[in-house]
Image (spheres, rainbow, N blue to C red):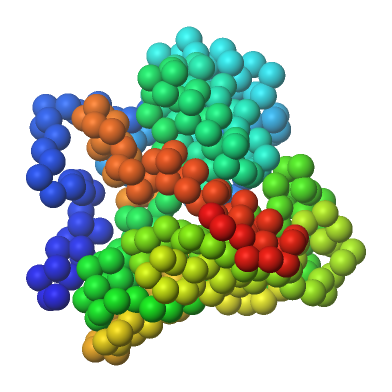
Amino acid sequence: MPTRRDFIRNMAMSSIVLPIGMQFPKAKAQKLRVALVGLGRYARLLADAIMVSSHCELKGLVTGTPSKEEEWGKKYNVPKRNIYNYQNFDEIASNKEIDLIYIVLPNGMHMEYAVRAAKAGKHVMVEKPMATNAADCKVIIEACEKAGVQLGVGYRLHFEPYNMEMMRLGQEKVLGEVRLVDASLGYNIEQTDPNDWHLNKKLAGGGALQNLGVYCVQAARYITGLEPVSVKAEYGPKHFPELFKEVEETLYWQLHFENKAVATSTASYVYGIDRLYASASQGHFELSPAISYGPFRGRSNQAEFDFPQTNQQQVQMDKIAQYILAEKPLPDHISGYEGLRDLKVMDAIYRAAETGKRVSI
């Protein structure tokens, strides 16, 4: 275990993180040139990360807010010729200074702009959830494959060392077969702006499950290394019905796996929780905080975890850049197909909550 742990630590701290056995051409010095679509809170984290990354540079912006064109252009040194709005977005196809378009829009807009980005001949990254349902994910995948461009989803935790350790302990059965996973995330948005897009069904696609539950579905899958076969779910009570008129405030669910493992989860806009816990046949391991931006803490029944806290967005962007610049396919665990697998589960969770019945996945 110490050798493996040191390996993961070194991977996280290095600006160049190569899969085992893969070698990228050393002569390739070009950086991946990125355009961000949608300049909200998370886009700011991505922009700041790109500015300190080793293999990326921020070369384009797309926004519907004129004041952001000037503010962001100046702060991130993006020339006016590379700043677009939602009306002239398709002109980005002729811009040879941009390699990849990162969609950071509300969930309900992901499919449209990912497809348009693919048609523009640019590689595509989409923030999670990849879309609001599995059918839209398939449309994005088909568009990218038809255009011959790469498609990835912003699964930053796949490059985060504490979560990587949870994956390793579970998938390699270090403490035996995982029998139970508790993956839950929630925070209180009682004081939020009632016009926040997360409360709008058309823009958000749903409530707590769409925004927070995708992390929990991911965690259950990457800790066990398995796909769930069925789900039971129910909506929680609404503490603030005046805010949650269109989307769910809280959702509880239970995923069942073919090996009899169970994953229980809560996604909520009123409960403060950020936890991953796994019980295996020979021990347990956990993180709390686990899914947010850290600082993370974790332990198993054998020892405390001791990993560096990383700039999650910077590590993610550098990893993505290394694959694309080397003309290597993005790994499956951050691919569009991974996004599709999550949405298949989430679709089933909604059906189970609406019907009150166990639903096959």
Q: Position of residue 215 (x, y in %)?
A: 51, 60
Q: Position of residue 268 (x, y in %)?
A: 67, 69
Q: Is residue 84 left or right of residue 9?
A: right
Tell me, yes or no, if residue 50 can be seen here: no
Q: Position of residue 340 (x, y in %)?
A: 49, 43
Closest to the observer, 214 or 103: 214
Placement of the N terminus among the 4 image quadrants: bottom left
Above/below status of 327 relative to 278:
above
Residue occupying the far bottom of the picture: 301
The residue under the point 14% across, 35% down is: 24
The count of marks equals: 0
Above/below status of 226 relative to 47:
below
Residue occupying the far right of the picture: 242
The residue under the point 70% across, 33% down is: 65
Q: Is residue 44 left or right of residue 319?
A: right
Closest to the observer, 64 or 134: 134
The residue under the point 67% across, 62% down is: 352
Placement of the C terminus among the 4 image quadrants: bottom right
Q: Position of residue 10 (x, y in %)?
A: 17, 61
Closest to the observer, 26 or 117: 117
Closest to the observer, 141 or 273: 141
The residue under the point 75% across, 60% down is: 354
Tell me, yes or no, if residue 252 can be seen here: yes
Residue occupying the far top of the picture: 94
Above/below status of 151 relative to 143:
below
Kindly indicate the quadrant of the structure image that contains residue 254. bottom right
